[in-house]
Amino acid sequence: MKNQRRWRPVVICCMVLASHAALPLPLKNFSSTQDRVLSEDVELQAMQKSVQEARDAAKEAYDRKDFVHAAEWLRKAGEQGDAWAQYNLGMQFQYGQGVPQDFAQAFQWISRAAEQGLALAQLTLGSYYYLGQGIPQDSASAALWYRKAAEQGDTAAMGNLGVLYRDHQGVPQDYPQAVKWFRQAAELGDASSQLNLGMLYEQGQGVPKDFAKAAEWYRRAADNGYPVAQYNLAMAYERGQGVPKDGTQADLWYRKAAEQGHAISQFKEGVKSLLGKNGVPDYEQAALWFRKAAEQGDAQAQFGLGALYQDGIGVPQDDSQAVVWFRKSAEQGFAKAQYSLGLLYEAGRGLDRSSEKANEWKLKAMVQGYKPAQASQETVKDSQSSDVRKAAEQGDAKAQFELGHAYQEGQGMTRDSKLAAQWYRKSADQGYALAQLNLGILYHNGQGVPLDDNQALQWVRKAAEQGVAAAQSILGNSYLEGTAVAKDVAQAVVWFRKAAEQGFAPAQFNLGVLYHNGNGVPQDDSQSIGWVRKAAEQGYPQAQYILGLAYQDGIGIERNSDLASEWKMKAIQQGYNPVSHGGIR
């Protein structure tokens, strides 16, 4: 009995774990590509004069922004086999310059150029495959074309190939190979590869861990103006990791990264402004930096800006604006913001007073271990405990539930699962839905009552049928796994959807997983990401991590390496460990 598995949200996704920078899609217009085109070989030198004339006419038209005629001349040269013209005509189709935007046509022309050995076209074709732009996504084909371009000395292709080896995309995961390609590109001055090589040294992946070498490569990328590298170098100086500890240097590099739009660095600049020089804060400057980071979605900055509005520091006092920014942060799972939003609901500041919503947000903060929320909850419970017992003994169903919960959690009294079950049953027998749910959970876990999944399912179903979202989600799990009921994925979908539509994050996540896998519903990555996002925005860490992977791999959503890193970091900051949670392999 001790090995009976407890109910928990199901994780049945199978996505690839990866991290750091994603692959850049070259966005070059053809007027700037001549410097990167291979020298013409003997055959190209012998091409008819009309081809060169068409190329010259295309460039002249493009330079005067006559894209229609540029495309016409490029087509003339391209149809005669000129790789340079084929590539640039493909790029005009990509951007809709002088021709209708058409990724399929872009792919066709760029492919013709790539097959002739034009490195820039090979790089671009690799990115088409990687992004699934105009064609099915195919990381293995991306790796093939990146390699062709890399072997011709294209630094962006080298860096991209390194990413694929590091992240096990289209090729076996191979950190030494990642190091090889990052190093080749880094030594040729590619800033993103310099950053990625530094990260491998910092983590000891493919090379011995070496903080000094990590800092050296961060510095090279930082000197090239790469903001993430500037941030990493600042952290190295702040910690004294690989370089002497130096607050002045840390501040300098944080500022450089912040000025280039790096959100975490902007938040740090805001904090630094609050602390002030020589103890004199600059609140207006703090508000400015917090706003820059907050508008990029940084939860800490959103909370900080909300706090400034609440107190009228650095900005005009405005409770409604405080609510706006606290809510944005709270919806990302930031506990301080959740608690602060709860207090505003409690006081009716900037919104209508609501004790129900106040308790809801404070409870979210409490669940994350935020001590002021926990202390607040204990104070309320201590003051109400005697009144609750009196009401429970007089037959009040809600009070009976609350007394059962107090016994179950040991709040204000000794923990006692048997007494918890007794009071839950009194309340459940009167039809109180939350008591029915909790009594069902006690039966499932064998706490205070004999372990009995049939009794568990009976009580959970009663609560689910009354609309309790958590009960609906558990019932969905039961149908999905065949626990005390015949396995029925269609019924699992029904109950997950009922809970998800009430905003219950685990059910939203599980429904998203079912859509991703086409289990019980038609496979639909768009629907999958829609539900996973809803759960992630409520601070559900598994959903945040999966959403990050979706952004990383372009599953149901456009690839975005920054958002991929941001969502995965949100999950990790909540203590989420993708390895221990399974489902990601």
Image: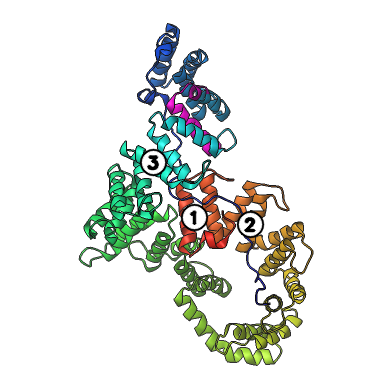
Please report the bounds of the magenta region as a residue range: 112-132
The crowding category of the residue bearing disc 2, from other C-alpha atoms within 10 Å (few below 14, some 14 to 19, many at least 20), is some
Tell me if 45 is positioned left or right of 396 in this view: left
CB atoms of marks 1 and 2 within 8 Å: no
Which percent across, then down, holds residue 102? 56, 28
* Label 1: element kind: helix
Q: Is residue 48 visible?
A: yes
In the rendered structure, which disc, 1 or 2, sits on the residue that comes first in sequence?
A: 2
Which kind of residue does numbered mark 2 sit on?
Answer: Ile
The crowding category of the residue bearing disc 1, from other C-alpha atoms within 10 Å (few below 14, some 14 to 19, many at least 20), is many
Which percent across, then down, holds residue 194? 34, 44
- The residue labelled by disc 3 is 180
- The residue labelled by disc 2 is 12
How far is disc 3 from disc 2 in space, using C-alphas?
35 Å
Which kind of residue does numbered mark 1 sit on?
Answer: Trp
Which percent across, then down, holds residue 255? 28, 52
Q: Main secondary structure of the magenta part?
A: helix
Q: Is residue 430 visible?
A: no
The crowding category of the residue bearing disc 3, from other C-alpha atoms within 10 Å (few below 14, some 14 to 19, many at least 20), is some
Which residue is at the front of the view, 380 or 30?
Answer: 30
* Label 3: element kind: helix
Extreme right residue here?
486
**Measuring 42% from the left and 53% from the top, which residue is drawn there?**
295
How far is disc 1 from disc 2 in space, using C-alphas?
19 Å
**Measuring 47% from the left and 65% from the top, which residue is drawn there?**
334
The correct choice, above or below, for 326 with respect to 526 in the image is: below
The correct choice, above or below, for 156 with respect to 313 in the image is: above
Which picture quadrant has residue 65?
A: top left
In the image, which is nearer the foreground, mark 1 or mark 2?
2
- The residue labelled by disc 1 is 567
CB atoms of marks 3 and 2 within 8 Å: no
